[in-house]
Image: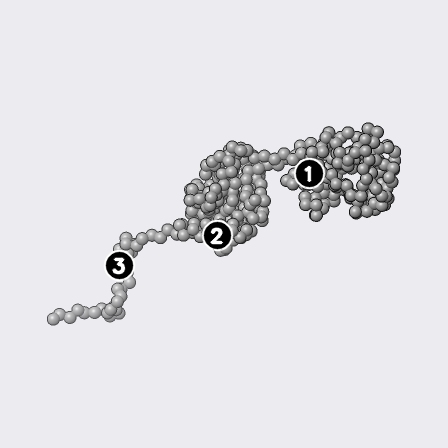
Amino acid sequence: MALTRLRAGTALIGSIADARIPASAVSQHAQSFDDNKLVNDISTLALREASNNDRASYNTNSSYIDVFQDASGIDTTTNAVRNDNEYVSSFFTSYGTASYETGDRTSIYTVTVENASNYNGSITTGSIDGSFGENNTNAWYFSDTAVNSSRFIRFDLGSGNSKIYQGIREYSNPDFNVSYGNWEIRASNNATDWTTLKSSFEWVNGFGNNPGSHEWSNTTPYRYIELRGVSGTDTSSRWHTEFEFKVLPLIEGVSATGNFTGTTITAPSSVSSMGAIITYQDQAGTNALNTDIVLQLSADGGSNYSTATLTALPDFSTGIKMAKVNDLAVTAGTNLKYKISFANQSDGVKEARIRGVSLQY
């Protein structure tokens, strides 16, 4: 029986010498592994967990999550606003021209006066109806002369209503120069937390003229506005007949276009491709991905953006849709950022609300 000569250094059992099997002989039987489905599932779970627990934006070594619980994850906005109901939409606000309200406003305001007496009419009618200076008709006065914080005249627009107040005019009768102590003007949205609009001033009959006025700078809407006593004394010889407020109109609406960007995320190493999942809502109409909602990603701090081709995924929840992009090539860098743009938006016709963003890197 012939013996096989063994070459020195060759293993006898369980191994084959290096480079004896070509790589193609191995790779032709190996199946490639695509981790995108796994990554997308993890991103979806992260969005759901953040939504359920009202989490602020955060990032890990390989992902970033924001469900707009607050505005901390938003960098810039152009005709786009984060709503307190935790979404971002194409929206604009502007202001008209401030002017004094006149005419009958008894159905708009509820008036409360502390430490007051009536004279020939109700306080509510006499202080906000526009029919002033007619022989003291519908006038009223304070029942004592001490001016302090327990004395106030409060105007309430009612639940869900607010206005931007920038001034007040007061009418009194008779028309002569009488001091009624020191007062302040303040505003609130809950009748507990107050903001001073006009600090302590001396209230002179008709605010110095008939009518006199006080004005201030303010762009915050409030439900309540009131005059509250500070110090001094007044006299019962004066009759208040009317108040008018200078109101700044707030103009709001859906902008046809707009965009917003996320804050810059620092990656642990250079990134040349990125992915993302977004959740969104068709508040009105049907928004087309990549046309009405456009996602762009950047790894160099927004200097260069790559535009994604978003693909629809199964709904995130009832009424909340979801879309994804994987392995989008970007200019390499470590400063990661996203930009979402709106187009073709119209009030009540087509309105998109972005509910969440998850970056993958």
Dot placed on the residue nearer the N-terminal end, 2 or 3: 3
Residue 318 seen in this snapshot: yes
The answer to whether the residues at label 2 and label 3 have Cβ atoms under 8 Å apart is no
Residue for point 75% across, 32% down: 129
Of circles 2 and 3, the one toward us is 2
Q: CA distance from mark 1 to mark 3?
A: 85 Å
Residue for point 50% across, 55% down: 60
Which of the 4 quarters of the picture holds residue 119?
A: top right
Disc 1: CA contacts within 10 A as few (<14), some (14-19) or many (>=20): some
Residue for point 58% across, 47% down: 71
With 148 as the anchor, is 165 left or right in this view?
left
Which of the 4 quarters of the picture holds residue 241?
A: top right
> Callout 2: helix, strand or loop?
helix
Q: Residue 157 — which label? A: 1
Q: Is residue 55 above or below residue 87?
A: below
Query: Which residue appears farthest toward the front when viewing the image?
Result: 120
Number of labels in the image equals: 3
Which residue is denoted by mark 3 in the rendering? 21
Dot placed on the residue nearer the N-terminal end, 1 or 3: 3
Which residue is denoted by mark 2 in the rendering? 46
With 80 as the anchor, is 220 left or right in this view?
right
**Image spot of residue 220 (x, y percent):** 68, 41
**Image spot of residue 189 (x, y percent):** 68, 43
Residue for point 45% across, 38% down: 289
